[in-house]
Image (cartoon, grey):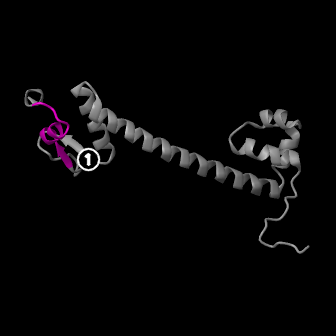
Amino acid sequence: MGLNMSQEPISKLTPKQLRALPLLASGMVAKEVALTVNVSQVQISNWKKNEEFMEELGRARKEVVRETETRLVGLAIEAVSALGDLMKNARSESSKLRAAIYLIERVGFQVSLDGYGKGGKKGIDMDLLLTALGAKEEERK
């Protein structure tokens, strides 16, 4: 049987170290990790002096960050969708307007009475916004 060079090398870390990595990477404090993995806090401190352990911990932390960013993007998409639904379907015209203004301002525009934003920002005319939201003529005055 030949050695497959495309596989990652077998880790020199112990099973307990490997169990501790994701816990530490996700922000659990050393005391809790030590209890969970059944080692002393001193042992956790010693592991943190080990170059290979710290390299693996760095990789694990990067993975936690990537996973968190992915989840945040998904939640942001859901939030925008929820605001869009509120903007379209709210019973109250005031709620529709607040949702619309919130979304518009988050993308860098300003809502104004004349369509010109302050400080060089592009503006959205309030009458046009209310028309787009389907507000009745008497509600716009």
Q: Which region of the structure is painted magenta?
A: 123-136
Crowd tier of the residue under label 1, counting other residues whose Cα lies within 10 Å: few below 14, some 14–19, many 20 or above: many
Name the spot of residue 67 as percent of width and height, x first: 60, 48
Name the spot of residue 118 as percent of width and height, x first: 20, 45
Name the spot of residue 100 as percent of width and height, x first: 27, 37
Location of the N terminus by quadrant is: bottom right
Residue 87 painted magenta: no
Q: Say what secondary structure mark 1 lies in.
A: loop
Q: Nearer the viewer, residue 117 or 6?
A: 6
| Residue at 64% across, 48% down | 64
Q: Is residue 100 above or below residue 14?
A: above
Asked where in the image residue 139 lies, by quadrant, the reply is: top left
In this figure, which residue is indicated by the disc labeled 1? Answer: 109
| Residue at 79% across, 65% down | 8
Q: What's the residue type where badge 1 is placed?
A: Phe
Q: Nearer the viewer, residue 122 or 130?
A: 130
Specify whether 8 is left or right of 77.
right
| Residue at 83% across, 51% down | 49
Q: Nearer the viewer, residue 117 or 137?
A: 137
Residue 124 painted magenta: yes
| Residue that extends furthest to the front in the rendered view of this protein | 1
Q: Is residue 60 above or below residue 141?
A: below
Asked where in the image residue 4 lies, by quadrant, the reply is: bottom right
Q: Nearer the viewer, residue 4 or 58?
A: 4
Specify whether 87 is left or right of 75.
left
Q: Is residue 109 above or below residue 84?
A: below
